Image (tube, rainbow, N blue to C red):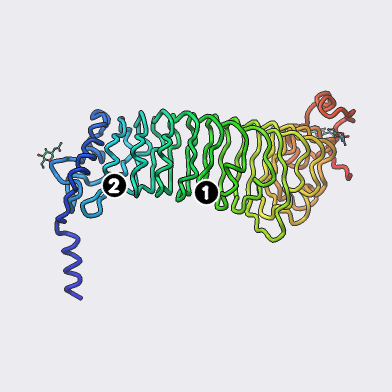
Amino acid sequence: MATAVLLLLLAVVSPSLASAIPSETAALRAFKSAVKPSSIPPASCLAKWNFSADPCATPRINDFICGVTSAGDRVVQLTLDSQGYSGTLTPLLSQLTQLVTLDVGENDFHGLIPPSIASLPNLQNLILRGNSFSSTLPPSIAAAKSLLTLDLGRNSISGPLPDLSPLAALTSLDLSYNKLTGPLPRLPPNLIELALKANSLSGSLTETSFAELTHLMVVELAENSLSGAIPPWFFLLPSLQQIDLAKNGITSVSVDAPPAESDSELVAVDLSYNKVEGMLPEKFSDYPELRSLVLSYNKFRGPIPGQYSREGSSLRRLYLDGNYLNGSAPQGFFSGNGQVSGSFGDNCLRSCPSSSELCLKSQKPASICQQANGVIYLPYKNETVDI
Ligand SMILES: *[C@@H]1O[C@H](CO)[C@@H](O)[C@H](O)[C@H]1NC(C)=O
Ligand SMILES: *[C@@H]1O[C@H](CO)[C@@H](O)[C@H](O)[C@H]1NC(C)=O
Ligand SMILES: *[C@@H]1O[C@H](CO)[C@@H](O)[C@H](O)[C@H]1NC(C)=O
């Protein structure tokens, strides 16, 4: 027992014999030299990279005390603090062949993402978010077969996305807040989370991109220029929980009920601020877990489906404002214990009780509704009328 403790102590305090292999030390040196010295604050991690010591030697007392982690004589992790480091990424990083994590997030790195990074055979986490990287996502990224997480959000990456389907291990892809254009490419087949919010992506949602994504839970595609129809298969992707397609140019939506034996986990759908025409899809009410449905500011017409208010419905948030919905709001929303929040305002409803929070926002003027729906509108009434 005492011996074991002693051995343990020795293992912790005795200097390791490991010293980084020269090509790795050279890569770290090149990495630091590509950062503007004036952007390295004295108390930061990079300031402690003093190459008169060995980057992999332990224990670390003054030098390399953070930002770099080794396993034996090899660098496995390069995780910088967020200090506003300004510089470029050296292509020599590809010499760190055991590197598992590269994280320089929330700094001021700019220029190219070196294509050679993709050749790192063990790289699992590439986190460059919140910098100023520009140019395109190198097509060579498809070679990074071990990648689990690719987070390049909030940069200035432009151009079309390459085919990402070879990234077989990737579960989380975040390229939100960049300048990407073009259609959605083929996506990594094991993706769980897809975030491409606030780019300029165009085209429609195709089966080529999505059909094999049986693990996909989160789709964040808001604030792009996607157009066309959302076909029924999309809502039926087996693991899907959250869909945000707000602020695009979608023009139609078709929804099928999930098959009886399936366990749809769809919880939230946001299609607000698109150009969707037609009636509200009744079948949304057949999704057993759907709690939040936001269809505001589209061009929906016709009545609010009574199914949305049926007893036992899972809906808790329902935003339908800013459309051309007509008829009377279904009684079911106002009779129960008022468990649905949201808005039915700014429509062409003939009645919607002002006592309900759902009806606080007023309806459109009759003249606009008449033009949109081609029917004569009687003066608007606040009380609910049974249909
Ligand atoms: C680096 O370490 C050497 C040896 O310990 C020391 O003389 C030197 O001042 C250090 N340089 C910086 C910039 O801290
Ligand atoms: C609602 O509008 C449609 C046209 O969009 C019209 O055919 C229908 O008669 C209207 N229904 C009511 C109750 O006003
Ligand atoms: C309808 O509701 C508005 C706002 O709550 C109220 O000012 C108005 O008097 C009501 N009209 C009728 C006919 O009840």
Q: Residue 229 carries which label?
A: none
Foreground: 321 or 196? Answer: 196
Q: Label 1 is placed on what type of residue?
A: Pro
The image shows residue 140 at horizontal and vertical percentages of 40, 38
C-alpha distance separating marks 2 and 1? 25 Å
The answer to whether 256 appears left or right of 329 in the picture is left
Mark 2 residue CB less than 8 A from any atom of ligand 1: no
Q: Quadrant of residue 225?
A: top right
Foreground: 160 or 174? Answer: 160
Quarter holding the N terminus is: bottom left
Q: In this view, does 217 lie above or below 328?
A: below
The image shows residue 60 at horizontal and vertical percentages of 19, 50
Mark 1 residue CB less than 8 A from any atom of ligand 2: no
Label 2 or label 1, whichever comes before in sequence order: 2
Foreground: 362 or 163? Answer: 163
Name the residue: 88% across, 42% down.
Answer: 385
Rendered-image quarter of ligand 1 = top left
Q: Is residue 312 above or below residue 231?
A: below
Q: Label 2 is placed on what type of residue?
A: Thr
Please give the residue where the numbered disc 1 appears in the rendered image: 189
Contact (Cβ within 8 Å) of mark 2 with mark 1: no
The answer to whether 325 appears left or right of 14 in the picture is right
Please give the residue where the numbered disc 2 appears in the rendered image: 97
Task: Identify the element where label 2 is drawn.
Answer: loop
Name the residue: 70% across, 50% down.
Answer: 315
Quarter holding the C terminus is: top right
Task: Identify the element where label 1 is drawn.
Answer: loop
Please tell me how many numbered marks the rendered image carries: 2
Foreground: 310 or 255? Answer: 255
The image shows residue 25 at horizontal and vertical percentages of 20, 42
The answer to whether 183 appears left or right of 168 in the picture is right
